[in-house]
Amino acid sequence: MTERKGRTVGGTECSWCKAARGGTGVAVITLRSSKPPNTHRLQTALHKLQNSHPILRSTLLQHTNTFSFLTSPTPFLQLTTHDLSSNQNNTNDSISLSPLQQILELELNNDSEWRDAKRDSTEMFFGSVYALPNNVWVVALRLHVVACDRTTAVSLLGELLELMEEKEEILSEENDKKVKHEASLAIEDLVPREKTKKALLARGFDMLGYSLNSLRLTNMKFCDTKATRFSQVVRLQLNQDDTKGVLAGCALNGIKVCGVLSAAGLMAAHGSKRGSKKYGIVTLTDCRSTLQSRLSDNFGEFMLRV
C-alpha cells in the first residue's frame, strides 16, 4: 500500500496561501454544454489528471501561519451536482448575466473553506456540474492558487479536453498508469544553487511572493465596511474586425494592448457610476514565453505573475 507523501510549502507558496485567506487566489474553469455531461467519464478523466499531477490530489494542511502538502496515493475528487435555481447569486439579481457567468461568479465566491484559518486541512481541487434551464449544463472546476494559476489552468483545460476525447476503455485502462506519487518541489528548490544568490533572482522571488498580497490600492476607501465581500466578473467581447482595429490602432500609435485594456476598464467603471470616483486597474501578464529559456505552461513549473 502506497503511503501518503508530504512536504512543507515554499516561501512563495506560503505567501499565496495567506493571500487566499483574504479572498484572493481562486482559479475557476467553466465549460458550457448543450448535452448532459457523462459524469462518470468526466470524473474518470479528472482522476487521471490527479494521477498525472500530484498537487491536484494533495490536501493543504494548516498550522497557524505554516502550511504543508499531504499527497494522497489515489485520486479522491468527487463531482457534485447542483440545480441553478437553488444556487443563484443574489448579489446579481439586478444585473442581467448569462447563466455561465453566474456560475463562474458563484464558484469564485465559494471559498469559505480556504478563508477559514481554523480549519486543519482543506482540499485544493473541486468539481461541480450545474443543470441550467433550456437544456444547458455547466461544468465548473475550482482550484486553490497554490495548486494552479491562470496559465496552468489553461494547460489543465487542454489536458482535460484531450482526455474526454479518448475512448472509454483506454481512459479506464490508463488511469492507474504512470502515477506520480509526489508533488513537485517548491519554486525556490527548483533554482540551481549557484544562481540563488543573484540579486535579480532574489527580486524576482519577491515579486512572486508579493504578487497576490500586493493587489491592494491604498488610496481607495470602502464606504461599506460591514457587507460581505464578493467577486464579480466583467467580460469584454470583440469580434474579429474590432480586434484587428484595436491592434492596428495600438501599432500606429505605439500603445501596448495592456494600456488600451486598462484605459477601457477605467472608462467603463467611470461610465457605470456616472461620476468621479477612485478606481484601480491591475493587469496580470503571462511572461513565460519571453523568458530565456522559455518556461513550460505545465504543472510543476514556475507560476509567474507580473
Image (tube, helix red, strand yellow):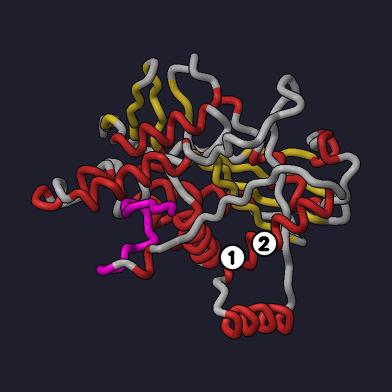
Proximity of marks 2 and 1: CB atoms separated by less than 8 Å? yes
Name the secondary structure under disc 2. helix
Name the one closer to the observer, 2 or 84: 84
What percent of the width, then of the height, locates residue 273? 84, 46
294 to the left or right of 198: right
Residue at the right extreme, as displayed:
94
**Type of secondary structure dominating the magenta stretch:** loop
> Measuring 9% from the left and 51% from the top, which residue is drawn there?
194
Q: Is residue 293 magenta?
A: yes
Q: How many marks?
A: 2
Name the secondary structure under disc 1. helix
Q: Vertical placement of 136 versus 80: above or below?
A: below
Q: Residues within 10 Å of mark 2 (few under 14, many from 20)?
A: few
Name the one closer to the observer, 6 or 34: 6
The image quadrant where one finds the C terminus is: bottom left
Q: Vertical placement of 223 versus 27: above or below?
A: above
Q: Is residue 239 magenta?
A: no
123 to the left or right of 38: left
- Bounds of the magenta segment: 292-306
Q: Quadrant of residue 267?
A: bottom right
What percent of the width, then of the height, locates residue 134? 88, 55
Q: Which mark is residue 259?
A: 1
The image quadrant where one finds the N terminus is: top left
Q: Which mark is residue 263?
A: 2
Question: As shown in the figure, which amino acid type bears the numbered disc 2?
Answer: Ala
23 to the left or right of 133: left
CA–CA distance in space, label 2 to label 1:
6 Å
Q: Vertical placement of 127 versus 195: above or below?
A: above
What percent of the width, then of the height, locates residue 232? 71, 44
What percent of the width, then of the height, locates residue 169? 47, 61
Question: As shown in the figure, which amino acid type bears the numbered disc 1?
Answer: Gly
